[in-house]
Every structure is written in C-alpha cells, then in structure tokens.
Amino acid sequence: MRQLLPLLLLAAAPALAQTTSPVIDRTDFPSLTAGVDSLRLSVASPVLPASAPPLSRRGANQTWNYTGLVPVSQRVESFVPASVVTATSLFYSFTFGALGGANRATVASPQALPIPAGANLPIAVTDTYQFYNLAAAGATPQDFRSVGFGASLNGTAIPVTYASATQQDVIYRFPLSFASLADSSNSFFSTPAAIASAGYLSQKRKRVNKPDAWGALTTPFGTFQTVRVVTKLLDHDSVAFGGMPGQGFDVPLTREYKWLAKGQHVPVLTITTRLLAGQEVVSGVEYRDIYRRIISLATRDAALDAGLAAAPNPSAVGSALALSVPAGSGPLTVSATDVVGRVLFRRSYAGGPASVRIEAEAFGSFRGVALLTVQTARGTATRRVVRE
C-alpha cells in the first residue's frame, strides 16, 4: 500500500491541476531573458459568432468555446529590452534607463500613443513606444505597470511620464488568480511643457481589475487553462494642438475581458466593450494565434456591400424595414445613426435567413435620413435610408 499510494497521487496530479485556477505571476509576462518577444495576434470581427458563450458567464471551472472566431487581420505584439530603446536617446536614457528611478523601465513595446480617436496631429509623430516595468523577482510590490511613453516628434525623442510613482498605470498585480481580490489604480500623465506650443495631451484613468472566472478556453489557437480578468477603464482625456484651446472629455466606459494563461505573455483572448447609449457593445476582439492567410477587409466589405439592400426606401414612420444581406453572412449587428452621428439604435441578429426585419419601434418617431451600418464576420457596409 505504501508503494501504491505515491503512484496513485502521481496519476491524479494532472486531474487535480484542472480543478484549480491558474496562478499568474511575473514569469508569465515578457521578461526578455531570451531577447525580443514577438507574439502574433489575430483580430476578429466585433460581431461575435452565435456559438460564442455570453460574456456574463463567470465563476469557477467554466468552459468557453470561441472556435468560431474568424480572423479579419493579424498583428504582431513585440517586446524588447528597454535598454535597447533607451540607448537610442539621451532623453530616454535619463528618463527610463538605470537612473530613471520610479520611471525605470525593463520592457518597451512599439505601440501607438493613447491619442483620442479622430484627433488630427499637426506634427509628425513616429517611433512610438510604451515603456513598462516588470517587478524583479523578490521585489515588493509585484506588478506589471506602464511607466510612460515615448515618441519622436519631428525627429526629436520626447519621453512622457506619469505624474508620480503612485500615479502610474498598474496593469496587473501578482500573484493573480480567481481567488484574488479586485484591485485598482489611479493614473495621470501629461505631455511636457516643452512641447506645449505644438500640442498637449493628458489622460486621467481609473483602472479596476476583477478576476471573475477560471476554466478551459478554446480558440482557433488551442485550448488553455485560464483565469479571466475583467478590467474596467474610466478615462478622462484632454487634448489641444497648435496653440488652440484644449478640450477635455470623458471616454465611454470601457471593459476588457481578458483570459490569461501560464507562459503566454499576453492574454490568449481579449474582448473589449464600450458602453454606448446604455448598452455594452463589443468594440474589439483579438486572440493569440499562428500565421494565417487573411482575405483582405476590402474584399470582405465589397462582398457584403454588393448584397446589402434596404426596402422600402424611403419608408414611412411607424413601418418596419426589411434588410437583405448575402446568404451565409451569419450573425450580424445593425446600428443606426442620424447624419450628425447620434445613435438611434444598435441591435444584434442571429442571421441565417437572407433578410432581417427591423421593427418600427427600433426607429421610434425618428424622421429624416439615417445611416444603417451592418457588421458581420464577413465585412462591414453602410446604407442610407429615409424615414418619412
């Protein structure tokens, strides 16, 4: 019996490993001991497949099947030792290098600056980076945080840091598992006064992380034991360019549903939503993947556009509208705006039939010109309709 017991425990070990939440720590993020870390990500349509589980599914020992995701494009997330980037500029070296103090970075990633959508920059911004600090083994606290940004403005490297160490954006705290309590950080950064004449950008952010589930996640990339973290982002941005008066505004509430797995360095799946007109709307989907040959978005959009029609058009207020889509389009989302961009409605349909009926109550008493945007896994297209 003494000889048999260890064998039984050994045989049971894999099964036991599947009945507890993974514990995510600093080793599961880019440490760059082997140099550059390049991770391929597929970007899928924001219209989730009908087979996708609801985002509200939470709790222990879940099973999520997202094999129906279809990539529409791919990108590569790269991480390099911060020293490689700081060596290119004295400004970067003094700010994010070994003498940077609280701003010292261990990892840098080529990423776009957090500039509000639609902002037209009057100056050339190139070679943009985000700088991170991954806490060393044994350090306190254990976390992965953003310590600043960098970009070349008309050829000059400009570092941007947070207001203080206590106002840096803490992305994850370790160890992280389903048992972890919710945590938050409040961050603030602004561009330096030296470039105020060219432009100004600041962001005040509250980040709240809450592990709400764990279990087996399956995507086209494979199956992983994961812990899901829901990140809530509350942002207030301020922007001004070319000496013009600035403008501050609250960004719609953003949630990131992130599935983290051991050794993957980035979430194996991220679904981003925004709160629009009181509804949580999926705005982005991406997942770890291998290289795939992607049919261009232009080809997808052209196919949907060719087969999309609305009738009757014009239509009377109080009447339904029939929307024809190409056969096999699958699940679709229809959003309607007026000509100045105000949202009239946004609705999801399961798809299947080649025609979708939009009931009159969706438009309410609206009268005038509306733009209907249809999103499917096969593309996006817009139609102009008139309500009389």
Image (cartoon, grey):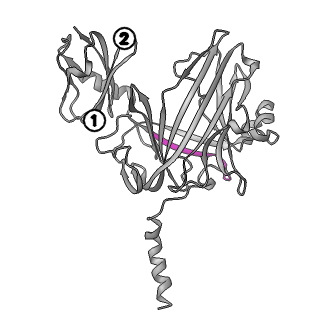
What are the residue bounds of the magenta stretch?
A: 33-42
Q: Is residue 150 above or below residue 259?
A: above
Residue type of the residue flagged with mark 1: Pro
Q: Give the overall secondary structure of the magenta segment.
A: strand
Q: Position of residue 194 (x, y in %)?
A: 77, 19
Give the residue pinned by disc 1: 331
38 in the magenta segment: yes
Residue 156, by quadrant, is top right
User: Where, by quadrant of the figure, is residue 82 drawn?
Assistant: top right
Left or right position of 139 against 351: right
Q: Which residue is mark 2?
A: 339
- Report whether 256 appears left or right of 385: right
Towards the viewer: 309 or 259: 259
Rendering quarter of residue 248: top right
Badge 1: residue crowd in 10 Å (few <14, some 14–19, many ≥20): some
| Image location (x, y in percent) of residue 275 | 43, 30
Question: Does residue 210 show up magenta in the picture?
Answer: no
Of callouts 2 and 1, the N-terminal one? 1
Give the residue displayed 47% in from the left and 54% down from the top. Answer: 226
